[in-house]
Amino acid sequence: MERAAVIVAIDGPSGTGKSSTSKAVATQLGLRYLDTGAQYRAITWWMVNNGIDMDDPSAIAAVAGKPEIVSGTDPSAPSITVDGTDVAGPIRTQEVTSKVSAVSAVPEVRTRITGLQRSIAAGAENGIVVEGRDIGTTVLPDADLKIFLTASPEARAARRNGELKGADVNATREALLKRDAADSSRKTSPLAKADDAVEVDTSDLTLQQVIECVVTLVEEKRAGK
Ligand SMILES: Nc1ncnc2c1ncn2[C@@H]1O[C@H](COP(=O)(O)OP(=O)(O)OP(=O)(O)O)[C@@H](O)[C@H]1O
Ligand SMILES: Nc1ccn([C@@H]2O[C@H](COP(=O)(O)O)[C@@H](O)[C@H]2O)c(=O)n1
């Protein structure tokens, strides 16, 4: 028997495990996967490359419709291109990370990227796991299941430092908190938990435990529990 498509929204602050969890859950359940942070990073990368003034929201808004951003949704090989260029590596630089909150706060940017996200989700025949900051509240308010991942700043900084060899854990913690504060305080669709989202504190859970928890929640939802 064919299963109905399921839409899963996973939101939360930086370093709570959204990407790792979403990819694994999508792979395990045969769903597509969309990293919406990568899309905001991609448009930021384009703005940096084209010399747009990041302190001028009207300059950002004026060119928000220009770059063509394409996201590949295979959870075992997610991809992202801008005007045909593979930017999976360049969007993870410190420069892009430090500027992405300013770009993603511009309403014209959000309208453009939200439109892309909705059309990708609508085209996912078997369903999709979409992760970001405003998926449950704004992008896909009718998602079948909404999860909001949290973790202490200390746990998140330690995890990120595991990736950034030799980085100072306090500096990493401060940078995470600064980005969360910017993302939570912007006017247009800030980082927020949807009222009907299930909150999962991952501070003391292994990644495997978080994955199992989310897979169980999806299976329960599919079984109509
Ligand atoms: N429960 C966990 N326990 C230990 N490490 C974890 C856990 N969840 C994720 N990690 C690790 O933490 C790091 C950050 O995870 P991930 O990139 O999935 O977070 P994120 O919420 O998507 O972050 P961002 O929003 O900044 O993209 C990765 O190295 C990942 O392997
Ligand atoms: N739904 C989303 C997703 C992301 N953002 C912005 O992008 C930044 C990068 O996200 P990562 O998940 O790759 O760390 C994030 O800090 C937000 O500024 C967003 O606004 N909405």
Image (tube, rainbow, N blue to C red):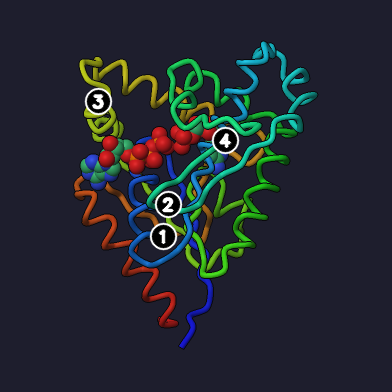
Give the camera-side residue of 68 and 122: 68
**How far apart, in angstroms, are the residues tagged by discs 3 and 2?**
23 Å
Q: Tell me whether circle 3 and circle 2 mark residues in contact (CB < 8 Å).
A: no
Disc nearer the start of the sequence (1/2): 2
Mark 3 neighbour class, 10 Å CA radius: few under 14, some 14 to 19, many 20 or more? some
Residue position for label 2: 148
Label 2: which secondary element = strand
Label 4: which secondary element = strand
Mark 2 neighbour class, 10 Å CA radius: few under 14, some 14 to 19, many 20 or more? many
Whether label 3 lies within 8 Å of ligand 1 gets the answer: no
Q: Quadrant of residue 15?
A: top left
Whether label 2 lies within 8 Å of ligand 1 gets the answer: no
**Residue under the image location 68 percent in, 38 percent down:** 110
Residue position for label 3: 161
Residue position for label 1: 198
Residue position for label 4: 81
**How far apart, in angstroms, are the residues tagged by discs 4 and 2?**
28 Å
